Amino acid sequence: MSDADNLENTIIIELKGGPVRIELLPDIAPLHCARMKELARAGAYDNVAFHRVIDAFMAQTGDVKNANMEQDFNIRLAGTGGSDLPNLPAEFSRIPHDRGTIGAARSQNPDSANSQFFINFKDNHFLNGQYTVYGRVVSGMEHVDALQRGEPPANPDRMISVKVASDS
């Protein structure tokens, strides 16, 4: 893979503690990777809250409809919305839900992922084969570990910005 391909498939999430670099897995889940890049390039993830952060489990974010400070933020609804784009079909694989992997959040319908995602704090293999894995944190996991806990957190941390590395 060329450096340009690597940068095109790297997401940088700026958190208050510093940057989190995510390697996307387009060979495993091409639709989910394309969606994350599309929403990042549109600025849709900027200022979006981590609305569900469960210690020793995962941190969930990406509700671009209800958890964005630029819009009418409603923490009661955070986690119930997505983007204006259509839902994605499941892209299940044998990639395990290990610490630092990115999973697509969804409703009970396996084909309902849209914009929300979660980052695993630990190996959560009970999720294997049930939620699409489409990336992994390659640096900055300590910033994810420092997120405010809660469902929702009393004072939720936000993704300050989300960018595709090749665009920088």
Image: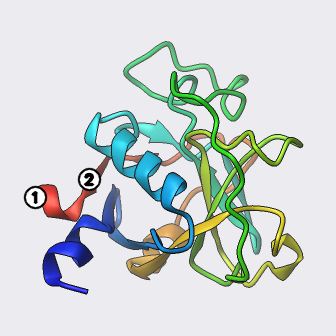
> Measuring 75% from the left and 45% from the top, which residue is drawn there?
106
Q: Position of residue 52 (x, y in %)?
A: 69, 48
Q: Position of residue 165 (x, y in %)?
A: 20, 64
Q: Work out whether residue 155 or residue 143 is closer to the camera in this orientation and state it.
A: 143
The answer to whether 154 appears left or right of 137 in the picture is right
* Residue of label 2: 163
Q: Where's the N terminus, which quadrant?
A: bottom left
Disc 1 packing (10 Å; few <14; some 14–19; many ≥20): few
Name the residue located 54 percent from the left edge and 23 percent from the top edge.
Answer: 65
Q: Nearer the viewer, residue 74 or 96?
A: 96
Residue kind at label 2, given as amino acid type: Lys
Q: Are marks 2 and 1 in contact (CB under 8 Å)?
A: yes
Residue beneath disc 1 = 168
10 sits left or right of 166 in the view: right
Q: Is residue 86 above or below residue 98?
A: above
The quadrant of the picture occupied by the C terminus is bottom left
Label 1 amino acid? Ser
Q: Depth check: give the residue in front, 18 or 155.
A: 18
Q: Secondary structure at mark 2?
A: strand
